[in-house]
Image (cartoon, grey):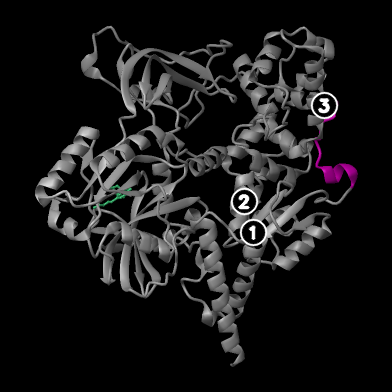
């Protein structure tokens, strides 16, 4: 064999191995090798492909990182239209549907397949000679948008399958974000000061329809395949066997789906998921029943765009109506004034709701929600319940139009509305409500991690006047604590010990703990890396801050504004006296800047090789790790980061882009 022939064989072998491990990890959730081994294979393949671009193919597992943005999506005509489903809203309607099927078929000799109805976004995937060639949205059912690049970034979608029986075929499924994935995405957006998504469905749809597929690649999207559309070749006789076949090809199907043979079994399935839906790690909005035999499906046909052989049984409304008793005001950590609804208690989707979000006054007036109104409230999965609209027909004339207070309900400062913002704010940083929220944030796990102080103790410390700002924690004395109710000798010592221990937290944690608006933990890390000490950060100008990659105008202004306030500077001074770390470890001890830090590099770097990067880390006193653990300080994610990125995200490890890494090690602007 020629040398090139050997390389090609090696590349093919690597791709097979990686695809297999990808499948074990993302589809079966049961990996066979460690992250480090997986990354090793991936790296080897990337290197070979870089050296031999003639062997690079679009379905190589290295190609899941997304491509440069497009102006707009192309159009894909669906070979077989994507239809919708008729709805049943309760067991009676399910029975009516079933009876109609029996009547039309003239017998009861059929099975049903029960599936969860995922609340995501319908997509169609076309495979030709085993290779994923096109992925599209449902669109109007006949024409969808070409989102192939975006769908290729979803790891549970196979880029290649071994489908000898089918030359060309199309599978359909629902792309979704898990509840956890949704929270993570929103948390990140919140930290960046971006608008959060209202629910997992919107977040999934927004992610899939990104013009820049590199953005999609960073969202933890997943898919369940629920059907075969167009197919050239031989297909099993039933839906269930088809799904089993697709599963054997490597597609991810929902393990909660089940074949049944009677109406009562189908109804049990429906009732069971009405009960258990909250336990699912993703959102489902109902179940779908499908006649299993394809021959019978053909006989039943369609009414309009809905098949007679299938029905969606919706979960009971998560909406309810109740009375809006009053509108309360909550003051947030950074002084945001948040109105909320005080409701007559009502059960929505199995939980009793007494309060609901109202967002802001603009929203209240746009929806014309008045105090005393009967209102529709809604609960979507685990999301905070919200008031959707008033029932205007139920008005008596007694309802009162709400107006926001002009002064803070807690400290009575006059409220301000910063330019271009919808939220009113209390400008008084010493406002007890703000101090309370800030204190809770300061002691929280990601911040100073003072685990002996919970919500109750925080409130008690403020009420007793022992603490007026977060820095006062460090001057608390044993005898002070003993004055508090239910505080014994032992607990007081524990509290003080836990406060004492927090003095060891690095500068970035202190920066984060200060609760500066728009400065999340990642941003705080960047700030520590850039400025090295609290003093330099306090002197930074908006321009200095804007020069840092990862820091936008809102965050930059917020930092400068924070340190322009006398009160905040005094807090920092108190923290200094208490001997918190206001300098980066390295500078303080004249040690190397990355001393004590462990950095793991994954994926392909663009401007330097991995070896160079690891060299640099060691040169600066850090350790270059091979797998992500709790000890990892940073994960540097290059292109196609693989499973380490997931691991890092699940551990909450700080993740750096190549650019951010270069800045950290002082190599930016080079090469
Ligand atoms: S079958 C002709 N099965 O629900 C049958 N649909 O109105 C076509 N959906 O947008 C659909 N989970 O994306 C089917 N297990 C499931 C589903 C499912 C979610 C969505 C589908 C479509 C809508 C149907």
Q: Quadrant of the N terminus?
A: bottom right
Is residue 585 depicted above or below 366 in this figure? Answer: below
Q: Secondary structure at mark 1?
A: helix
SS type, badge 2: helix
Is label 3 in a helix, a strand or a loop? helix
Determine whether 451 is above or below 251 in the image.
above
Q: Looking at this view, name the residue that lies furthest to the bottom.
A: 1
Asked where in the image residue 578 lies, by quadrant, the reply is top right
The residue identified by callout 2 is 647
Check disc 3 and report the residue beneath it.
500
Question: Closer to the camera: disc 1 or disc 3?
Answer: 1
> Residue at the spot x=49%, y=24% of the render?
417
Task: For marks 1 and 3, give the CA distance.
Answer: 37 Å
Q: Nearer the viewer, residue 351 or 410?
A: 351
* Residue nearer the viewer, 280 or 469: 280
Q: Residues within 10 Å of mark 2 (few under 14, many from 20)?
A: some
Magenta residues (range): 576-590
Q: Residue 326: x, y in percent?
A: 40, 11
Q: Earlier in the sequence, mark 1 or mark 3?
A: 1
Kindly identify the residue that appears in the image at 47 percent across and 38 percent down. Answer: 195
Question: What's the mark number on residue 35?
Answer: 1
Give above or below for 314 relative to 352.
Answer: below
Would you identify the image quadrant in which residue 437 lies? Answer: top right
């Amino acid at each position: 064999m020629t040398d090139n022939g050997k390389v090609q064989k090696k590349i093919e072998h690597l791709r097979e191995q990686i695809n297999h491990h990808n499948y074990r990890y993302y589809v079966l959730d049961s990996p066979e090798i460690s992250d480090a081994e997986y990354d090793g294979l991936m790296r080897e393949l990337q290197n070979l492909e870089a050296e031999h671009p003639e062997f690079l193919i679009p379905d190589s597992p290295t190609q899941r990182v997304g491509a440069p943005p497009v102006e707009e999506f192309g159009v894909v005509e669906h070979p077989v239209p994507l239809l919708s489903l008729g709805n049943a809203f309760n067991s009676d309607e399910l029975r009516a549907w079933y009876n109609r099927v029996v009547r039309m078929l003239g017998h009861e000799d059929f099975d049903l397949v029960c599936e969860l109805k995922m609340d995501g976004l319908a997509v169609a995937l076309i495979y030709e000679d085993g290779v994923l060639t096109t992925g599209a949205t449902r669109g109007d059912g006949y024409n969808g948008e070409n989102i192939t690049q975006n769908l290729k970034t979803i790891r549970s979608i196979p880029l290649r399958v071994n489908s000898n029986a089918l030359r060309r075929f199309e599978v359909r499924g629902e792309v979704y974000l898990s509840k956890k994935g949704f929270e993570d995405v929103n948390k990140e957006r919140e930290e960046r000061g971006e608008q959060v998504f209202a629910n997992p469905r919107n977040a999934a749809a927004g992610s899939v329809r990104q013009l820049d597929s590199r953005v999609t690649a960073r969202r933890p999207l997943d898919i369940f395949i629920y059907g075969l559309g167009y197919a050239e070749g031989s297909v099993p006789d039933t839906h269930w066997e088809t799904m089993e076949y697709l599963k054997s090809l490597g597609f991810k199907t929902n393990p909660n789906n089940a074949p049944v043979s009677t109406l009562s079994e189908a109804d049990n399935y429906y009732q069971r998921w009405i009960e258990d839906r909250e336990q699912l790690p993703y959102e489902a909005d109902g179940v779908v029943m499908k006649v299993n035999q394809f021959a019978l499906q053909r006989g039943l046909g369609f009414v309009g765009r809905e098949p007679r052989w299938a029905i969606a049984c919706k979960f009971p409304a998560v909406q309810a109506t109740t009375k809006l008793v009053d509108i309360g005001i909550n003051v947030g950590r950074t002084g945001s004034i948040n109105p909320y609804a005080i409701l007559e208690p009502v059960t929505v989707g199995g939980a009793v709701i007494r309060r609901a979000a109202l967002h802001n006054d603009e929203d209240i007036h746009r929806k014309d929600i008045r105090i005393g109104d009967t209102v529709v409230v809604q609960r979507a999965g685990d999301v905070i319940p919200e008031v959707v609209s008033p029932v205007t027909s139920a008005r008596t004339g007694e309802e009162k139009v709400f107006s926001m207070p002009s002064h803070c309900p807690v400290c009575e400062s006059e409220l301000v509305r910063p330019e271009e913002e919808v939220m009113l704010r209390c400008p008084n940083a010493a406002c007890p409500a703000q101090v309370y929220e800030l204190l809770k944030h300061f002691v929280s796990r990601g911040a100073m991690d003072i685990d002996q102080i919970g919500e109750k103790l925080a409130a008690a410390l403020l009420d007793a006047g022992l603490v007026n700002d977060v820095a006062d924690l460090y001057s608390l004395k044993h005898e002070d604590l003993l004055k508090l109710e239910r505080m014994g000798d032992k607990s007081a010592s524990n509290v003080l010990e836990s406060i004492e221990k927090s003095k060891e937290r690095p500068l970035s944690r202190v920066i984060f703990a200060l609760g500066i608006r728009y400065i999340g933990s990642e941003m705080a890390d960047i700030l520590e890396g850039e400025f090295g000490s609290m003093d330099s950060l306090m002197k930074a100008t908006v321009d200095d801050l804007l020069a840092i990659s990862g820091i936008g105008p809102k965050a930059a202004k917020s930092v400068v504004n924070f340190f322009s306030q006398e009160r905040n500077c005094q807090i920092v001074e108190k923290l200094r006296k208490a001997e918190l770390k206001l300098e980066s470890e390295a500078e303080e001890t004249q040690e190397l800047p990355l001393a004590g830090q462990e950095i793991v590099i994954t994926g392909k770097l663009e401007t330097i090789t991995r070896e160079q990067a690891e060299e640099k880390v060691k040169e600066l006193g850090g350790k270059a790790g091979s797998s992500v653990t709790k000890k990892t300080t940073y994960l540097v994610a290059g292109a196609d980061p693989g499973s380490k990125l997931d691991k890092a995200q699940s551990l909450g490890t700080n993740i750096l882009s190549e650019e951010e890494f270069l800045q950290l090690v002082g190599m930016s602007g080079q090469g």
